[in-house]
Image: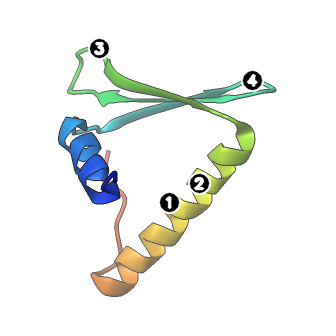
Amino acid sequence: MHDDNEAVEKVEARIESRYSNFLRVGYNQYEFLLEFGQLYGERAECVLSRIVTTPAYAKEFAMLLVNSLDEYERKYSEIRAPEE
């Protein structure tokens, strides 16, 4: 018998985490392209991960992010945009 928890742990052990302070979004009729990366000062951006998804899943992602930000602010405090 296969243990689902064991399978999940194996997948999670392979997930690589990276810090991102840069996001570029592109789209066409059929898909959205999300590029996450790093940008520091005058140096060129470094794209670390590219996610391609459908418009419907991009909209779900946006709604999930907005809901998560709202929950965060209720729990901790208002998030202020960084100063330029």
The residue labelled by disc 2 is: 62
Q: Position of residue 17 (x, y in %)?
A: 21, 39
Q: Nearer the viewer, residue 29 or 40?
A: 29
Q: Nearer the viewer, mark 4 or mark 3?
A: 4
Q: Are marks 4 and 1 in contact (CB under 8 Å)?
A: no
Q: Secondary structure at mark 3?
A: loop
Is 67 displayed left or right of 44 in the figure?
right
Residue type at the position of mark 2: Ala
Q: Position of residue 29 (x, y in %)?
A: 81, 26
Residue at image position (36%, 75%) is 72
Dot label at residue 28 = 4
| Residue sticking out furthest to the right | 29
Q: Are marks 2 and 3 in contact (CB under 8 Å)?
A: no
The residue labelled by disc 1 is: 65
Q: Position of residue 82 (x, y in %)?
A: 31, 54
**Mark-to-mark CA distance, 1 and 3:** 27 Å
Is 63 displayed left or right of 41 in the figure?
right
Residue type at the position of mark 3: Ala
Is 23 displayed left or right of 27 in the figure?
left
**Mark-to-mark CA distance, 4 and 3:** 25 Å
Q: Nearer the viewer, mark 2 or mark 3?
A: 2
